[in-house]
């Protein structure tokens, strides 16, 4: 036999020894005559190769789970079945949900008994002694999703509007904030005006017209439109000199607010009497002065 004829025979000879060469990977192609390193290393007679491949551990087989269309290497079938998306699954939270493994993540994102963390952050950095903290404190609550809404309404880290300044403050710091809020107003118990608490003592000393500590103040008739303000002695002199004007402004105010007159009745009467007495005293003094001069 000529050398060339022998070569031709060997290339096709059924008894030539060949690698199975089905690929290890997921690729469907491969299995050429020699394959490469990543393929079945089994060496068989060429004429028996198809028989070997029919039971080769690297052959593709369909996944055994109904609904799954994947074909996988037979030697990795168990591995695939364990994680197959179409596998029947139950929820690890033991809720009544039943479905396919591939849908479990979506279910758990809304599963009512999944444990969820609150994690709401403080609106401010460290509190009190921790003022220097670079990180905000967080709510550490964890619980079933169905309880989360109730928690949110009670969460110590929820924002609540300060009733003085309207700023959103962490509920757990609200009391402390409101106690010292810059916008906190109090009612001056001397004059009844609403005053910023941080300015109360200044108010008492400079503008409260009924405070004992008054050094400077508004005219007692400022609510009736008198704009006069001054020291205690200046106010006394003003009350004497402008008594007639005050009487007029009280009368005007009474007219303008006839509807609410009843509510004012007592106070206005008292003021009017005061004015009348001041006028009478001034007149009496003037009379005495005239008598003395005579
Ligand atoms: Zn041969
Ligand atoms: Zn093989
Ligand atoms: Zn499958
Ligand atoms: Zn569930
Ligand atoms: Zn919380
Ligand atoms: Zn505030
Ligand atoms: Zn006051
Ligand atoms: Zn006045």
Image: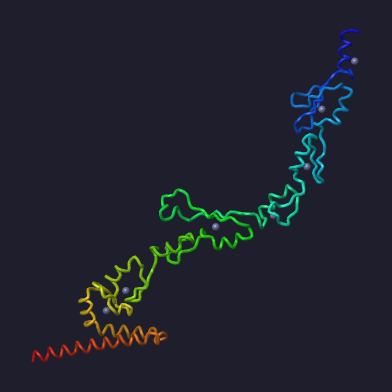
Q: Is residue 118 left or right of residue 84?
A: left
Tell me which corner region of the image, top left, top right, bottom left or bottom right, holds residue 190. bottom left
Q: Is residue 82 left or right of residue 247?
A: right
Q: Looking at this view, is 163 or 24 the one in front?
A: 24
Q: Position of residue 91 (x, y in %)?
A: 71, 52
Q: Position of residue 139 (x, y in %)?
A: 53, 55
Q: Position of residue 114 (x, y in %)?
A: 65, 54
- Structure colour scheme: rainbow
Q: Is residue 159 left or right of residue 200?
A: right
Could you tell me which residue is drawn at 35 percent across and 70 percent down?
A: 195
Q: Looking at this view, is 280 or 51 the one in front?
A: 51
Residue that sits furthest to the left in the current view? 294
Residue that sits furthest to the right in the current view? 1
Could you tell me which residue is drawn at 87 percent across and 22 percent down?
A: 46
| Up/down of 201 relative to 81, above or below | below
User: Which quadrant is home to the C terminus?
Assistant: bottom left
Could you tell me which residue is drawn at 56 percent across and 56 percent down?
A: 141
| Up/down of 7 relative to 227, above or below | above
């Amino acid at each position: 036999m000529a050398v060339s004829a022998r070569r031709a025979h060997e290339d096709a000879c059924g008894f030539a020894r060949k690698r199975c060469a089905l690929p290890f990977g997921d690729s469907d192609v491969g299995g050429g005559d020699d394959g490469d390193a990543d393929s079945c290393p089994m060496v068989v007679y060429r004429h028996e190769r198809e028989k070997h491949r029919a039971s080769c551990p690297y052959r593709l087989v369909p996944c055994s789970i109904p609904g799954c269309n994947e074909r996988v290497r037979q030697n990795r079938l168990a591995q695939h079945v364990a994680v197959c998306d179409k596998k029947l699954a139950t929820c690890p939270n033991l809720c009544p949900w039943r479905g396919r493994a591939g849908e479990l993540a979506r279910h758990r994102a809304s599963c009512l008994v999944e444990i969820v963390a609150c994690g709401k952050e403080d609106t401010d950095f460290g509190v009190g002694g921790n003022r220097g903290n670079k990180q905000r404190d967080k709510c550490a609550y964890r619980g079933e999703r169905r309880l989360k809404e109730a928690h949110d309404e009670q969460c110590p880290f929820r924002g609540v509007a300060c009733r003085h300044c309207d700023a959103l403050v962490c509920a757990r710091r609200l009391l402390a904030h409101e106690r010292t809020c810059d916008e906190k107003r109090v009612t001056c118990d001397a004059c009844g005006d609403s005053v910023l608490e941080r300015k109360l003592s200044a108010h008492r000393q400079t503008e409260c017209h009924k405070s004992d500590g008054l050094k400077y103040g508004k005219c007692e008739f400022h609510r009736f439109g008198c704009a006069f303000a001054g020291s205690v002695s200046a106010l006394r002199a003003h009350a004497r000199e402008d008594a007639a004007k005050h009487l007029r402004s009280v009368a005007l105010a009474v007219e303008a607010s006839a509807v609410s007159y009843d509510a004012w009745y007592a106070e206005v009467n008292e003021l009017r009497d005061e004015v009348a007495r001041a006028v009478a005293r001034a007149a009496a003094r003037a009379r005495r002065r005239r008598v003395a001069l005579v």
